Amino acid sequence: MALREEIIQTTTSPITLSDRAATELKSLIEENDKSGAALRVWVAGGGCSGLQYGMALDDAEPEDGDVVLNDRGVKIFVDEMSLRYMTGSVVDYVDDTLGGGFKIENPNAVKSCGCGSSFSTEEEGMEGLSNGGGCGSCGCH
């Protein structure tokens, strides 16, 4: 955890990318011939813990209300409501026995479930989001 705290304290962007995530994203953008695309990240109600992350490559213009960030040469689009739950987060790319994938390290998450994409914060009510009933992928709902 000390490493994560160091990363967050030394960054200036509300959402940052690890070196590995930036490299993987640049490769994906190039392989899919989507020069100029951004990583769109968001939070939606649902999942085992009440909130879940979403990520996609977005080659459209930013939407009204989007915050546009740039880290390590990769554009990041995030809506203002999602940013409220994700400020300080680091998007990483990890390899495991099932393959590789992107993972969000969120200092605001006080609880997460085994699926890795669901979390909750201390904030009650989660304005603008409806709570879900479980993602079902980890069996903890």
Image (cartoon, helix red, strand yellow):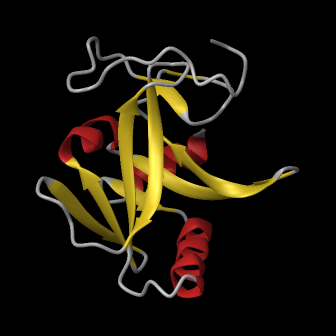
Q: Position of residue 76 (x, y in %)?
A: 34, 65
Name the residue: 28% across, 25% down.
129
Q: Nearer the viewer, residue 67 or 130?
A: 130
Image: 72 above or below 138: below
Image: 65 above or below 2: below
For the N terminus, the image quarter is: top right
Image: 72 above or below 131: below
For the C terminus, the image quarter is: top right
The answer to whether 29 appears left or right of 74 in the picture is right
Q: Nearer the viewer, residue 2 or 137?
A: 137
**Residue 112, quarter of picture:** top right
**Residue 44, quarter of picture:** top left
Name the residue: 19% across, 56% down.
66
Q: Position of residue 34 (x, y in %)?
A: 44, 83
Name the residue: 69% across, 28% down.
137
Residue placed farthest to the right in the image? 97
